[in-house]
């Protein structure tokens, strides 16, 4: 018989750097999860990703056991990494902080595609291009 999920938590945590401090500790504590066990498992599975932000979905079962699924980093994070910047433009409409060529767009779209609600690579590229423009990143047509 399958265990019953009593709570599902969604957090974004830097890879390899989860700690019992907020926001991780309080969120897991309220759900009755062993915080130390989660922190150790998460850090072990994400160590090689550096400090990249990793969205994670944690399922808590009625016996207080848990499992978690890691998603790909947010599109904005992938875009900034590709252009070598720390953050997006202060005034995205007028300020440009970098440029993505089609190859960059395709690489990011392929990496992020499993998390996007799209049917093909072209649609995924349009989603990523929209995110890039909203951050002040020029997109080569």
Image (tube, rainbow, N blue to C red):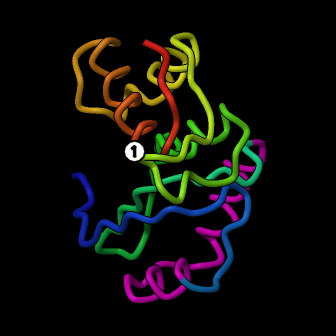
Relative placement, left or right, of 28 versus 99 is left
User: Residue 99 placed where, x, y %?
Assistant: 59, 27
The residue identified by callout 1 is 134
Magenta region, residue range: 23-48
User: Residue 131 placed where, x, y %?
Assistant: 39, 39
Query: Residue at point 77% right, 48% down?
Result: 50
Query: Residue at point 67% right, 33% down?
Result: 83
Relative placement, left or right, of 24 versus 119 is right
Quadrant position of the C terminus in the picture: top left
Q: Quadrant of residue 117?
A: top left
User: Residue 6 placed where, x, y %?
Assistant: 24, 72
Query: Residue at point 66% right, 50% down?
Result: 52
User: Residue 30 placed where, x, y %?
Assistant: 39, 88
Membership of 64 in magenta stretch: no
Q: Nearer the viewer, residue 77 or 5?
A: 77
Asked if residue 63 is positioned above or below residue 121 in the image, the reply reads below
Asked if residue 103 is positioned above or below residue 110 in the image, the reply reads above
Q: Nearer the viewer, residue 3 or 30?
A: 30
């Amino acid at each position: 018989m399958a265990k019953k999920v009593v709570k599902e938590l969604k957090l974004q945590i830097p890879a390899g750097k989860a700690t019992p401090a907020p926001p991780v500790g309080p969120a897991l504590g309220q759900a009755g999860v062993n915080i130390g066990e989660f922190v150790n498992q998460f850090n072990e599975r994400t160590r090689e990703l550096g400090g990249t932000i990793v969205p994670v979905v944690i399922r808590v079962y009625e016996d207080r056991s848990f499992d978690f699924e890691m998603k790909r980093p947010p599109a904005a994070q992938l875009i900034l990494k590709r252009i070598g910047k720390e953050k997006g433009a202060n005034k995205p409409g007028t300020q440009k902080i970098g440029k993505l060529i089609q190859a960059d767009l395709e690489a990011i779209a392929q990496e992020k595609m499993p998390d996007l609600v799209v049917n093909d690579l072209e649609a995924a590229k349009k989603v990523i291009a929209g995110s890039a423009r909203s951050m002040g990143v020029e997109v080569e047509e």
